Image (cartoon, grey):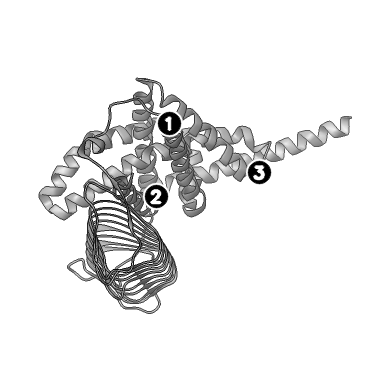
Amino acid sequence: MFKKISMSVLMMVLLLAMAVTTAFAATNDMSAYQDSSGNIDITESPVPNTQFMFAGSNVVANSIFDTTTLFAGSAVTLDGEYNGDVFVAGNSVIVNGKINGNLYATGNMVTINGEVTRDAFVACNELTISNTGIISRDLFIGTATAVINGTVGRNLRAGVGNLTLNGLINGFVEAETDQLTISSNAVITGPIDNRSENQAIVAANATAPAVNWEQVTQEQQAPEKQGKSVGSILLSIITQFAFILVIWLLITFLTKDFNDNTRIMAKKHILVSLGIGAGFLFLSPLIIILSFIIYAPFGVAMTCLIIAGMILAMPVAAVVFSKLLTGYFNSKMKPLLSSFVSVLIIAAAVIILGFIPVVNFLVGLFLVVMGIGFIGYNILFTNRKLKEERLEADEMLMIDEVIDAEESSTEDKIK
């Protein structure tokens, strides 16, 4: 279970970051902080709340941020203070400042020298928490190697190749490792559960309870070929529902223009969106190859972007298609509740069809193509065409409401 933490955290960071920035064409002007080489240096105090996403070759942030922020680059150094959650991705990530929220970090090497006042989620190759590093609440990590010399205020959950504890863990430790090492300066107040092929190495001077060792052999680590259990099916259903609802919440509350556009796209532009999505899938291998030829890091970024788009496409398509049902429910309930009920129905239909062989592939492919098409159509036409069509649709709706009101008044008079 723990070895799945790395991929789970990585996908969570990727999805949330891409959902806010790329999928819904969120824009952010970085010209005030960017030089000709693409490096970002943020020293303004404080940074406006409208600027929340920063991406460049090398990113250095040393200011006050009063909103949730996202940073991406080859090397990212976070000084200063962050009053909100922080999402960060890079080859090298260094956190020196104070984060008054949660930290979501992914990359090759992640180093935490500062303070995180809530939880930290880290997926990387090498993690180091120095003597000055503080995670005030829980720490969730999926890494190849991790060295914790600092403080974890509550519990540690880890899926790590080699894990070395040499600081304070003020709670329990749940780990699945190749090798767990508890050094002499370590202080662990809660129970330690370690699932590993090798017994933990515990220094004589370490302040820690006995390690509950669950020995795992190579045979046990190899997955057995067996059918899905009822629990795994239920977990899959809940996960898919939650994923679609998260995307619905992002679209409904954080991306007003995209939310307004979905109604028009679902009613008038399905075929065009289908064509855009199919064209994107056909051209994506060529785009990736050209990106790597131009600049290798750009190729990696483009590959991640395309993968994220494909992952997001299905729930985006489900949310857009749910707009076709809202007209039926709008007369029976409030608009927000109508939208919620509609997306639940579409999500249930998608999940049920997903358990039917062959049909699941066809439905999944259709939704991916449509989702990519909807995103692409929104990016290409959101500034003019869709806004004009939204205004026309709103005018027609107002006219229909007036006509319905007049007809109702006339009927009342006749009665």
Labels 2 & 1 near each other (Cβ < 8 A):
no
Residue at 31%, 67% in the rendered image: 30
Q: Residues within 10 Å of mark 2 (few under 14, many from 20)?
A: many
Q: Say which quarter of the image contains residue 207.
A: bottom left
Q: Amino acid at mark 1?
A: Ile
Reading the image, the residue beneath label 3 is: 334
Reading the image, the residue beneath label 2 is: 24
Name the mark on residue 233. Answer: 1
Q: Position of residue 209 (x, y in %)?
A: 35, 62
Vertical position of residue 272 compared to residue 197: above or below = above
Residue at 45%, 41% in the rendered image: 244
Labels 1 & 3 near each other (Cβ < 8 A):
no
Q: Residues within 10 Å of mark 3 (few under 14, many from 20)?
A: few
Q: Residues within 10 Å of mark 1 (few under 14, many from 20)?
A: few
Q: Residue furthest left?
A: 293
Q: State how far apart marks 3 and 2 are (Cα).
A: 25 Å
Q: Camera-side residue: 23 or 162?
A: 162
